[in-house]
Image (tube, rainbow, N blue to C red):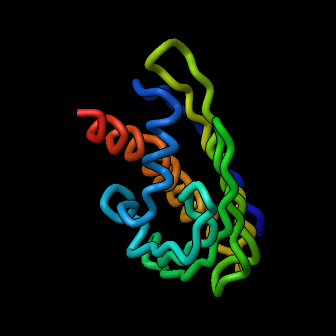
């Protein structure tokens, strides 16, 4: 069962600050209530995370993920191997400067769920994921800028 979710928000910060917040994997559980823990397995030569182990919980369902990250100057993407709840996962943040200290952040997520779930649960979970991925990220970035 493929599920797509996407949304965008403007954050009052440059793209570098947003990418830095996203790269701080060890802190993700502090701003994402979906993440119970996250650990960087290895890093690229520039220090950005390459492989990450994470435990997520949404709507009472826990899943352990192994993610592979790729980074650009204004984007980050990740893909997950098969888990107990997903056949695959692809996520991405794309950043576009809109002024000197403002960035449009687009978040896209594609999940192929391993089992069917009721539509109302999927809809509620999508809203929760989008809110955390964008609004909580925004709060994290702005708190780091203070």
How many numbered dots are placed on residues in this image?
0
User: Which x, y percent locates residue 62?
Assistant: 48, 81
User: From this viewpoint, which residue is outermost toward the left?
Assistant: 146
- Residue nearest the viewer, comparing 126 with 75: 75
**Quarter of the rendering occupied by the N terminus:** bottom right
At 47% from the left edge and 39% from the top edge, which residue is drawn? 18
Is 85 rendered above or below residue 34?
A: below
> Could you say which is closer to the camera, residue 78 or residue 89?
78
- Position in image of residue 61 (x %, y %): 49, 79
Outermost residue on the bottom side: it is 84
Q: Nearer the viewer, residue 39 or 4?
A: 39
How far from the left and from the top, in percent, is residue 72? 68, 43
Residue placed at 45% from the left, 73% from the top? 38
Q: Left of 120 or right of it: where is 60?
A: left
Which residue is painted at 46% across and 46% down in the image?
20
Q: Residue at x 72, y 77 (%)?
A: 81
| Quarter occupied by the C terminus | top left
Nearer to the camera, 43 or 76: 43
Residue 100 image offset from top left, x and y in percent? 48, 14
Would you say 26 lies left or right of 15 here? left
Spot the residue most to the top: 99
């Amino acid at each position: 069962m493929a599920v797509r979710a996407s949304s965008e928000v403007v954050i009052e910060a440059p793209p570098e600050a947003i990418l830095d917040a996203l790269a701080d994997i060890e802190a993700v559980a502090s701003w994402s209530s979906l993440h119970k823990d996250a650990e960087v397995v290895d890093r690229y030569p520039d220090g950005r995370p390459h492989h990450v182990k994470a435990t997520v919980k949404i709507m009472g369902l826990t899943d352990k993920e192994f993610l592979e990250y790729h980074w650009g100057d204004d984007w980050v993407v990740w893909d997950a191997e098969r888990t107990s709840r997903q056949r695959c996962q692809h996520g991405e943040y794309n950043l576009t400067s809109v002024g000197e200290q403002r960035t449009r952040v687009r978040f896209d997520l594609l999940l192929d769920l391993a089992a069917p779930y009721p539509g109302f649960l999927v809809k509620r979970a999508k809203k929760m994921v989008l809110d955390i991925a964008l609004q909580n990220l925004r709060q994290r970035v702005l708190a780091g800028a203070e």
